[in-house]
Amino acid sequence: QQQVKQSPQSLIVQKGGISIINCAYENTAFDYFPWYQQFPGKGPALLIAIRPDVSEKKEGRFTISFNKSAKQFSLHIMDSQPGDSATYFCAASGYGGSQGNLIFGKGTKLSVKP
Amino acid sequence: ETGVTQTPRHLVMGMTNKKSLKCEQHLGHNAMYWYKQSAKKPLELMFVYSLEERVENNSVPSRFSPECPNSSHLFLHLHTLQPEDSALYLCASSQDRKDGYTFGSGTRLTVV
């Protein structure tokens, strides 16, 4: 119930292409879904986040799509650039107690080829 | 200084040593966290402090001992570690244990 399942483990995309990373959850009490980006030697940094009251959120080239009924959400990176090469983590949390803690997926290593 | 600062950035310690990791946040947040990041389990929650009180210990061995003297500082005291404890230890903070966490750059720990 507390797991967040992320796929794929790794992804190779050509420059200018679209990168898509998917996550699924089971706990219906989750109400906050962020994506983090991590470069080697750095901690994860918040990239974009969504709450269940909307189905999509866009910030620049990054879009989260959220499907509440399917309990799935995904990150789309449009016009992918070599500088986007990093590891991406999805996460989820809910209200109260342990559910207030962010639960992370296992990460997706993205490589954007020039 | 801004954000979340962790020191040291790298640490090599023997199995019988005692060392401490330090985390400081300059964001005015009231919750702080320790995470362990390794190849096998990418982001494992270890400890949660809310308003300087430990609210969660995620079944972490007693050789890891956290300390939160105030809302801006968090320590992780280490003693008699095992080689499998080698990992990147990340500190994070947030407001009210909700919403986005801000992570530090981590301490890369190697136990020899």
Image: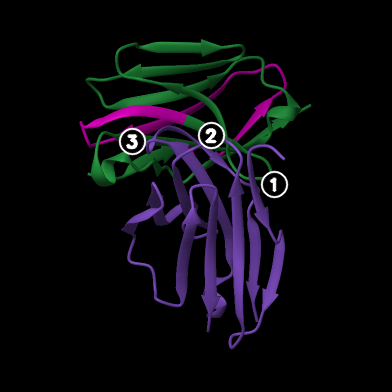
Chain colours: A green, B purple
Q: Give the residues in magenta.
A: A8-34
Residue B84: x %, y % from top left: 53, 74
Residue B93 or residue A31, whichever sits in front: B93
> Which badge, 1 or 3, is on the more N-terminal residue?
1
Q: Where does label 2 land, which residue?
A: A36
Residues under labels 1 and 3: Cα distance? 25 Å
Which disc number belongs to residue A93? Answer: 3
- Of the two numbered discs 1 and 3 in the rendering, the one whose residue sits closer to the viewer: 3
Q: Is residue A41 left or right of residue B18?
A: right
Residue B24: x %, y % from top left: 60, 50
Residue A29: in magenta span: yes
Q: What kind of residue is marked 1?
A: Pro
Main secondary structure of the magenta stretch: strand
For the residues beneath circles 2 and 3, the answer to whether they share a chain is yes
Looking at the picture, does residue B55 appear above or below residue A47? below
Task: Kindly identify the residue that appears in the image at 58 percent across and 64 percent down.
Answer: B87
